[in-house]
Image (cartoon, coloured by chain):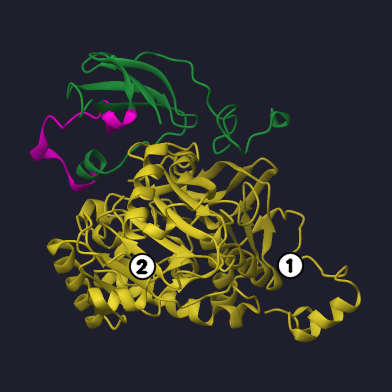
Chain colours: A yellow, B green
Amino acid sequence: MIKKSKKYSVFSLVKNALSYHENWQPAWRNPEIKKEYDAIIVGGGGHGLTTAYYLAKNHGIKNIAVVEKGWIGGGNTGRNTTIIRSNYLWDQSAAIYDHALKLWEGMSQELNYNVMFSQRGVMNVAHNLHDVRELKRRWHANRLNGVDCEWLNTQEVKKFCPVINTSPNIRYPVLGATLQRRAGTARHDAVAWGYARGADAMGVDIIQNCEVTGININNGNVTGIETTRGTINTKKIGIVSAGHSSVIAKMAGIKLPLESRPLQALVSEPVKPVIDTVVMSNTIHAYVSQSDKGELVIGAGTDGYNSYSQRGGFNIVEDTIMAIVELFPLFSRMKMLRHWGGIVDICPDASPIISKTHINGLYFNCGWGTGGFKATPGSGWVFAHTIANDQPHALNAPFGINRFSSGELVDEHGAAAVAH
Amino acid sequence: MLLINCPYCGEREQVEFSCGGEAHIERPKNPPDLNDDQWADYLFLRKNIKGLQYERWNHSFGCRQWFNVARNTATDEILAVYKIGEKPPELESNNPITPCGEPAIGSGNFSTSNK
């Protein structure tokens, strides 16, 4: 845990203010790479860092390295739209995402790092009879799984989010919505930084600017990794490299059921608070929230082809903006400031793979596709358990890679909130 | 947006097309003899290459014909277009320097000093 002398508090703030904030210490070390570790996590995003954190905290494995190609928080962790919710349809998904949501609720306290988790609610809007039926089905499925969810009719939607256009005369009128009040947003960089700091304090080595170029395997057992900074030995490797999972898997001679695609997002100029919740619509493909800085945060869709280019097609952005403007006519003259893409690894059933492989000591946590951010703490929690015990936690047992042979898919395309 | 040279209609914008994923995946000749892992391989497992990829496209809002495209997925460059049934052309592609690294063109993260 964080040593008392290094804790952030009102006292540390005052103390550092007196020295003009010139003496703040780095949140984590820049360690020398050791020759050997008990476990190596490939990928220093949110999921990788939480994996290392919970390996150290829950399982007492502290001789760990997190190896990151770029810098902490520079991948998809810093590229998503920061939405957190757990209103998934199937029991398996509801269980793992709700476990994550419970961890989010205590995260800032636990990490001694403000991740600005804001339970402002997430509304999934229905625009036609089919939407109403599907969303009501999910609402009931959520209730049966103990996940909070309620149904709002058109008037209640308008009351909850006054800026939404509920006119019956638009092409896709608002017929109702589900609302998960415990859902919300968090500051994505802070999540990565907070977990990096927490893991570092327990002795985890966070190694940035170190790219994995090979995986060493001997007689079906993992022996280490090759990196741009030399060979590192280990008996356990957890791969958490999101869009590049297939690239790393290829080094171990494994094929995964993944397709990597660009997913785009954009933010507007900052304005005064206008929308205090998250609005998502599957049918017209739009989702929007407002950041604490005042920018509208808008998520677009994935491109219809594989790419690692971190850029998507402009037509995808155009479609999303058209939908946003119909749903929120008052946004029509806002200027968009920034726009970017991230590479997401999509599974055929839109559910993740958190699994052992046929190679001893090689584990994969991938396939989160378009919605991994919300699962960050839960994903690390169960993946750490899988690596430490060489068998899955009850929560990720349904998400094994063998489900593609057995046929026990967890089809969550409907609950992806927007169609990808 | 990509500009795709349909072998039947010529150059059109990508919104007219749909991508059919990895090309040259052969349907099993003896389906009843396949075990579950072999089915999984045929149905779900994909190369998902970073670099030169051969893929199928359909001109769905045009001539509705299927054809193959060789494209570099790291840079989105289209290197060749060829018809269904033809052998994939052997091509030199501008692959990233390291397996996960950035390609020499088309990436905001790449600086020439890394070369």
| Image side of residue A274 versus residue A180, left or right | right
Q: Nearer the viewer, residue A399 or A222?
A: A399
Amino acid carrying mark 2 in the image: Asn
User: Secondary structure beneath disc 1?
Assistant: loop
At 36% from the left and 13% from the top, the residue drawn is B89
Q: In this picture, is A157 found above or below A290?
A: below
Q: In this picture, is A409 found above or below B81?
A: below
Amino acid carrying mark 1 in the image: Ala
Query: In the rendered image, which residue does mark 1 sit on?
Result: A27
10 Å crowding of disc 2: few (<14), some (14-19), many (20+): many
- In magenta segment, residue A83: no
On-image quarter of the N terminus of chain A: bottom right
Query: In the rendered image, which residue does mark 2 sit on?
Result: A396
Q: Nearer the viewer, residue A314 or A321?
A: A321
Measuring from the top left, give residue A124's x and y in whole percent: 30, 67
At 74% from the left and 83% from the top, the residue drawn is A9
The residue range painted magenta reads: B14-37
